[in-house]
């Protein structure tokens, strides 16, 4: 669903009368909207003083949109995240190109403007991820460029139980082959040109690896398809099988790979955890559920969108004109054992 204006029902003003709160959509679905009730409210200061309130909203809605606070820089976003969730995280074991612009604030994925990025939870193709991710719109696109979101709990419920249970029990294997100019080089993915550093990272994160000819690297890792939120206990759909699978590539790229490469040499692909192929019908069912649960709204300059990364997935629509969305992540969590207080 797409909206162009906010509903004005069920508005709540905080005890300090500094902010107004209401659902962005009239049926109380995500995102929850918070706006200043008077000029000059400092978002970082207010949010740091109301961390539990924001956490409660995140656990209910999965996403909170802060609008009208006049955020204009990467430094302001970083200050907001630090006050709310502590130190920001580096973006390691990357799957998409992006630039570090200030501290641990990064550009959003730098895919061409005409490409759509499907819904996904950040780093759900690994066994370690941030619990919080925040986007800030510094320059909205002239046309398009929304960041659609969806409730991962609703996605889980919307998927055919047969498909859902099959993925939950078999998990997902991600196979990546770096080199050859078709995807990110391993040096960018691991943020190091030292093979020893890469090998140590893989060994400590449960990633199988093998060096191929001509400085190429192949990795395999089996990760969750379904996860339980550590704070609420709710099951969520939490993987990127539909993104990594070769069927998710643009038609021209997919046809080129199929005609010129052995499957094992594809830059990335997804399988069930035992290495068997994922049925096209199952992937179609997943994509149907994702589309069904998508919520989209136009960015406004200065918007900050805070997501509980396990409860809300995000995407990107194609756009026209300049667009600058920056992002920061915080509060690390590991399925090997929590490193978060979430």
Image (cartoon, helix red, strand yellow):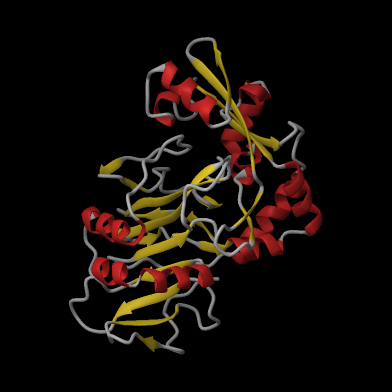
| In this picture, residue 143 sits left or right of residue 74 | right
Residue 251: name its quadrant: top right
Residue 148 drawn above or below residue 37: above
Q: Residue at x 22, y 71 (%)?
A: 42
Residue 330: x and y in percent read: 39, 51
Q: Is residue 135 left or right of residue 316?
A: left
Q: Is residue 329 visible in this depiction of the protein? A: yes
- Is 117 in front, or is 96? 96
The picture places residue 154, in percent across and down from the top left corner, at 64, 66
Image position of 279 (left or right of 83):
right
The residue sitting at 73% across, 47% down in the picture is 167
Image coordinates of residue 81 in percent, x first then y, are 32, 58
Q: Is residue 138 visible?
A: no
Viewer-proximal residue among 112 and 178:
178
Residue 24 is drawn in which quadrant? bottom left
Q: Residue 111, located in which quarter of the rendered image?
A: top left
Quarter holding the N terminus? Answer: bottom right
Q: Please, is residue 163 above or below residue 250 in the view?
A: below
The outermost residue toward the top is 213
Q: Is residue 261 left or right of residue 21?
A: right
Q: How many marks?
A: 0
Q: Residue furthest left?
A: 40
Residue 83: x and y, percent? 29, 60
User: Residue at position x 56%, y 13% from top?
Assistant: 212
Q: Residue at x 56, y 28 (%)?
A: 267
């Amino acid at each position: 669903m797409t909206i162009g204006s906010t509903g004005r029902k069920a508005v709540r003003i905080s005890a300090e009368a500094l902010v107004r709160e209401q659902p962005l959509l009239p049926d109380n679905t995500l995102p929850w909207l918070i706006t200043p009730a008077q000029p000059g409210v400092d978002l970082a200061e207010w949010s740091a003083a109301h961390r539990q309130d924001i956490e409660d909203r995140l656990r209910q809605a999965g996403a909170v949109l802060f609008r009208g606070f006049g955020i204009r820089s990467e430094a302001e976003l970083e200050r907001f995240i630090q006050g709310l969730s502590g130190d920001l995280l580096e973006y390691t074991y990357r799957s998409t190109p992006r630039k570090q612009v200030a501290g641990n604030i990064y550009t959003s994925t730098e895919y061409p403007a005409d490409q759509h990025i499907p819904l996904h939870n950040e780093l759900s193709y690994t066994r370690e991820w941030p619990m919080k991710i925040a986007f800030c719109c510094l320059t909205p696109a002239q046309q398009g460029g929304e960041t659609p979101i969806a409730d991962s709990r609703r996605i889980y419920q919307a998927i055919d139980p047969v498909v859902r249970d099959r993925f939950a029990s078999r998990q997902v294997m991600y196979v990546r082959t770096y080199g050859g100019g078709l995807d990110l080089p391993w040096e960018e993915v691991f943020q190091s040109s030292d093979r020893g550093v890469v090998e140590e990272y893989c060994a400590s994160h449960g990633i199988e690896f093998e060096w191929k000819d001509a400085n190429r690297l192949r990795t395999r890792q089996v990760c969750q398809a379904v996860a339980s939120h550590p704070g609420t206990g709710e099951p969520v759909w939490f993987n990127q099988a539909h993104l990594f699978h070769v069927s998710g590539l643009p038609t021209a790229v997919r046809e080129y790979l199929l005609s010129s490469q052995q499957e094992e040499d594809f830059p990335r692909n997804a399988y069930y955890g035992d290495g068997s192929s994922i049925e096209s019908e199952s992937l179609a069912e997943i994509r149907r559920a994702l589309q069904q649960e998508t919520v989209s709204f136009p960015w406004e300059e200065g918007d900050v969108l805070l997501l509980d990364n396990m409860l809300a997935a995000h995407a990107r629509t194609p756009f026209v004109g300049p667009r600058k969305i920056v992002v920061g992540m915080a509060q690390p969590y590991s399925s090997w054992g929590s490193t978060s207080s979430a």
